[in-house]
Image (cartoon, helix red, strand yellow):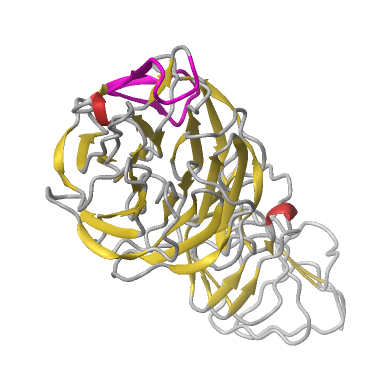
Amino acid sequence: MATIRRAGFGSVFEVENETVGIGTTGTATNTLQVLGDIKSSDAKIIGLSTLTTYQGFVDKEAKFGNTLIDVESQAGTFGEIIIDGDVVVSSASTLTSSVNQLSVTDSFSVPTGNTDSRIHCQTAGSMRFNEDLGTLEFYSGDEWRTVNSFRDMGNRGRALIAGGENSPSGTDFKIIEYLQTSTLGNTLDFGDLTNTNMQNPMGLSSSIRALFGGGSPTIATIDYVTIASTGNGIDFGDLTSGRPRGSALSSSTRGIFVGGNPGINVMDYVEIMTLGNALDFGDISFTGKGPSATASPTRGIIANDYSSNTDIDLVIIASKGNAVAFGKDLYYGGYGATNGASTGSRGVWMGGYTSSTGTSPTQNLRRTTAIRGVEFSSGGNATEYGDLVDASYSVYNSATGTKNRGFCFGGFVPEIPSFNATNVIQFMNIQSGGDAQDFGDLSIPRYGIGSACDSHGGLGGY
């Protein structure tokens, strides 16, 4: 058959082993070369065909089945993409598109690895599965953040209060109590800790579990309970070292135990939904005896200690490392107020005291009713938001909260010989600030308590 360079034809046209140009002005360079649009109602192609396209080669819809699809870097798709079957996305591949909607009818896999194998990512929105945390995480453009791993069923709002002591009797308590944060009233019995000597424990929680770790004099035990139910504590593991009077903070998945007596500046961390011993996280910048800690979903803030420290430290919960400077608590450099409360964007801590001339809690004490706090998103000095009901019982209290309310439990008057403890529970509105109000009572007056809540500001977001 002769070479045909330009052709016009009717209902049937067959060409074999020759070059054909349709709409071309010169010699065709391919077996079939068409300049312009091709429209067909009944096209049949036998053999291997290659179609080279430009950006936007599919106008309406692309359907990918269980086949190997090679998408060149210059290709793109507009509209809807439907993937039927398994699709593997490699960390070495890049797909750039302007897709309005992506529907996956089966499943797809993202890159996986531990925390230390994170690559330096340049693209905000990149996602991977962190095998250490057991969660999805994404790159925000500045840092890796953990995706939420819980679903809010609308039945949260429970705070737990555990342990404590009552001087001068020297009695230590292992009781766990709870209250509903949205109401007013006294605490109800929840169960018992595993160890009577878990006085001054550190408390933290996810939306599901509460953990209480440490105690006097050198208890390393970590207990856990399921917040939505009642019952006794169950062994979780141990801290890296036994100690009381530290503090704790947490995100949805990771908990950090901070500091402790005597002057321990270490931080331990655990994955809350697992079991096992705590691991070293890093160090804070001061002695860590009696600090106050609270958290957003990504950041932890740690303030104050027994040395009348005024520094405020910052940690990134999802990554290990030493704390860095955040600001100053210029309103009151004191100690004895353990844990704090958080809305997720604002963190507060309540009360405390310091000695002006000595180190003993009975020497020339200065107490404070101040409620101070910071905004997590920016560094800076603490701001005063209000006052507790009474400064007399602002020492060795414990705090936790929801995203709206902050709670302060117990405390004592530290002058000899009284050491009178209180059973008062105070609460304040973290969002608006203002003075605290009476909420109800603990079952027994005491101080040195651990506390946790299933709806604190460290949950949610990432």
Question: Foreground residue, 175 or 88?
Answer: 175
Q: Quadrant of residue 437?
A: top left
Q: Is residue 451 visible?
A: no
Q: Nearer the viewer, residue 431 or 309?
A: 309
Q: Give coordinates of residue 66: x percent, y percent.
A: 63, 82
Tell me where the magenta segment starts and ends, as one range: 358-385
User: On screen, 351 above or below 60?
Assistant: above
The front one of 172 and 67 is 172
- Point out residue 431 in the picture as x, y percentages from the top left corner: 26, 32
The one of 350 and 42 positioned closer to us in this rendering: 350
Tell me: 386 left or right of 240: left
Whether residue 31 appears in magenta in the rendering, the answer is: no
Q: Can you tell which quarter of the image residue 46 is in?
A: bottom right
| 61 sits left or right of 142 in the view | left
**Residue 405 position (above or below residue 218):** above
Quadrant containing the N terminus in the rendered view: bottom right
Count of numbered marks:
0
Residue 339 higher or lower than 278, as above or below: above
- What residue is rendered at 48% in x and 34% in y? 291
Say whether residue 378 is magenta. yes
**Residue 74: horizontal and vertical position, in percent?**
71, 53
User: Can the viewer see residue 218?
Assistant: yes
Q: Residue at x 38, y 15 (%)?
A: 364
Q: Position of residue 161 (x, y in %)?
A: 31, 52
**Which residue does the image show at 74% across and 55% down from the upper left?**
117
